Image (cartoon, rainbow, N blue to C red):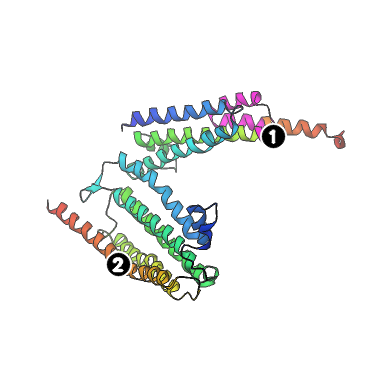
Amino acid sequence: MTVEVFGARQRSRNFSFAAEVFAREPLYAGAALCLAALIAPTLVAMTLDGRTLAGVNVWLKPLRFEVALTVYLATLAWFAGWLPQGVTATRWYRIYSVCVVCAIAAEMIWITGTASLGIASHFNESSPILAWTYRLMGGLAVLLTSSALVYGILILRNRNSRFDPAFKLSAGLGLVLSSPAEARHMRQVHLSWVGRATVATCA
Amino acid sequence: MSLDAIFQLCTTVALAGWVVLLASPIAPTLADRIAGLLIPALLAVAYAGLVLAFWSRAQGGFDSLSSVMLLFTKPEIALAGWIHYLAFDLFVGSWEVRTARAERIPFLIVLPCLFLTFLFGPAGYLAFTGLRAARAMSSLARTPSLQ
């Protein structure tokens, strides 16, 4: 019995990480590439734009989201190699993954748009539209982070006997546990943002 | 980085792309990659960064000539517009070189079109399209079935 830890393709001679993630999950891999492509113009904007919000450059937040979501999607695309056989071809998965990518696109448009206007995206209650957008984006953030949870559950339920059980458990539990951790981290990020905003306002 | 410095840098980089295009008969693959992909992409990054940073603070818009003129009164947006010219002109120039190579049009005939594209973008494209049309017509006239 061979124990498959890194996936069969990794042993092939012409291994490349990019080709591998595109083979495993083309939609997430493609979305990760698009997000990565946004990093360069955002860095240019950050260099040229002196506006700040809560004491930091307005473009820092879009940059953080671009980097974080690129890593998130590329990681998920990599983990797609351990999903049960054929799951990525099912109807529910295809609809779900498109929804996740659309949620990420909406978040990025919102965060980049508000940065370009020089206003806060999160906790912005200054107009009804912004307040409602913030609530909607909160829902979409839950949707996009749920993908780690879904992947974790699917990997734990994968009955392929070629997987090392310890590896399966660690990958699956890691993903399942990272979902609430991710949500908590996002909350902390938001709170620290508010904290800084409050300090800035008070000052 | 000042706007003038960005202007100088982008113009120099675009000029380098045109020089590479001139050398394309010697190194076609390299010219395609540099003038058709790398330099337009770099200019596009500069353009996108400028638009991200300054678009929301510019007045005007696309709906009328006076709106467009108002838009370009903001130096950052005028610079973005200039980089737009640089990127797209070079991209079209490199497309002309690639197309000419694929259609076996001699490089010396393409040169005037490239020169026009460099200076007056769409006029060069028009000249190149006219050149291709003329060649297509003359090869059509030479086919035996039409004689």
Q: Is residue B80 magenta?
A: no
Marks 2/1: CA–CA distance: 58 Å
Please state the horizontal and vertical placement of residue B111, each as a whole percent of the image. 61, 24
* Amino acid carrying mark 2 in the image: Ala
> Residue under circle 2?
A181
Q: Which mark is residue A38?
A: none
Question: Looking at this rendering, what residue extends furthest in the left direction?
Answer: A203
Asked whether the beta carbons under mark 2 and mark 1 sit within 8 Å of each other, the answer is no
Give the residues drawn in magenta, as a range.
B101-130
User: Chain letter of disc 2?
Assistant: A
Q: Is residue B34 visible?
A: yes
User: Chain letter of disc 1?
Assistant: B
Whether A169 is drawn above or below B143: the answer is below
In the image, what residue occupies the spot 36% across and 52% down? A67
How would you rate the neighbour count of disc 2 (Cα within 10 Å): few for under 14, some for 14-19, many for 20 or more? few
* Amino acid carrying mark 1 in the image: Glu
Q: Foreground residue, B31 or A169? A: A169
Please state the horizontal and vertical placement of residue B26, each as a whole percent of the image. 60, 27
Whether B65 is drawn above or below B108: the answer is below
Q: Is residue B107 magenta?
A: yes
In the image, what residue occupies the spot 22% across and 61% down? A191
Q: Which mark is residue B103?
A: 1
Q: Foreground residue, A119 or B65? A: A119
Q: Regarding mark 2 in the picture, which secondary structure is present there?
A: helix
In the image, what residue occupies the spot 30% across and 67% down? A181
